[in-house]
Image: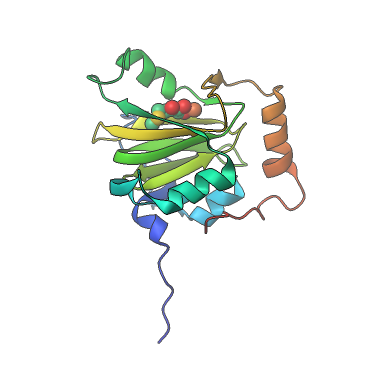
Amino acid sequence: MGSIAKDPREDVIQAWYMDDSDEDQRLPHHREPKEFVSLDKLAELGVLSWRLDADNYETDEELKKIREDRGYSYIDFCEVCPEKLPNYEEKIKNFFEEHLHTDEEIRYAVAGSGYFDVRDVNESWIRVWVKKGGMIVLPAGIYHRFTLDSSNYIKAMRLFVGDPIWTPYNRPHDHLPARQEYVETFVNADGAGLAVNAAA
Ligand SMILES: CSCCC(=O)/C(O)=C/O
Ligand SMILES: [Fe+2]
């Protein structure tokens, strides 16, 4: 009897539709019954994902190739915990405000885990749980937010093409070219939904 091979990325990245509860943002917020979202479905929103070897990121040839292919010349690390992140409380609050960036947001969890929430084409929230070894790209112009999960810790590599611009534009910023391009490409376009993850 044949079996369908499991996507190895799903060991470190899972996604699901969120409920509407105002409970603690660090809880999973699954719907009842749970509604999982495949990583291919995420790719249709422009959200790309990889599973990488987080214990060897310094020598990882797969990461090197992704950086070369996509032009990610810049890296640094963002450790989200009170001891390591200056102005922790303010940053945590800001990360969870719905916002967009004019460039990709590229994050690779080298330790810990967290939730990147993204809006789908119908404005519903999809929660993307990124654990150690998971790397995601949020496209420029997608509305999103970030929160720690109940483990309360993530160390993320941040990557960028050239000099980094981290500016968040809190919703609404629909007039920005990056937002308009996102909507044309992934929300309104004929064939929207056909994008595929180059890494898959
Ligand atoms: C885990 S990195 C901190 C979150 C962040 O940088 C961001 O821009 C969230 O949207
Ligand atoms: Fe962001």
Q: Is residue 48 above or below residue 200?
A: above
- For image coordinates 57% across by 26% down, the residue present is 101
- Residue 172: % across, % down: 62, 20
- Asked whether, in this view, residue 12 is left or right of residue 182, the answer is left
- Asked whether, in this view, residue 2 is left or right of residue 120, the answer is left
Q: Is residue 39 visible?
A: yes
Name the residue at the front extreme: 59
Q: Nearer the viewer, residue 104 or 163?
A: 163
Q: Nearer the viewer, residue 135 or 96?
A: 135
Q: Quadrant of ligand 1?
A: top left
- For image coordinates 36% across by 48% down, the residue present is 59
Count of labels shown? 0
- Residue 40: % across, % down: 54, 56
- For image coordinates 56% across by 31% down, the residue present is 143
Q: Quadrant of the N terminus?
A: bottom left
Q: Is residue 74 above or below residue 12?
A: above
Name the residue at the bottom extreme: 1
Q: Nearer the viewer, residue 191 or 195?
A: 195
- For image coordinates 42% across by 71% down, the residue present is 5
- Asked whether, in this view, residue 88 is left or right of residue 40, the answer is left
Q: Nearer the viewer, residue 113 or 157?
A: 157
- Residue 135: % across, % down: 43, 44
Q: Is residue 145 above or below residue 50?
A: above
Q: Which quarter of the figure has residue 71?
A: top right
- Residue 183: % across, % down: 70, 36
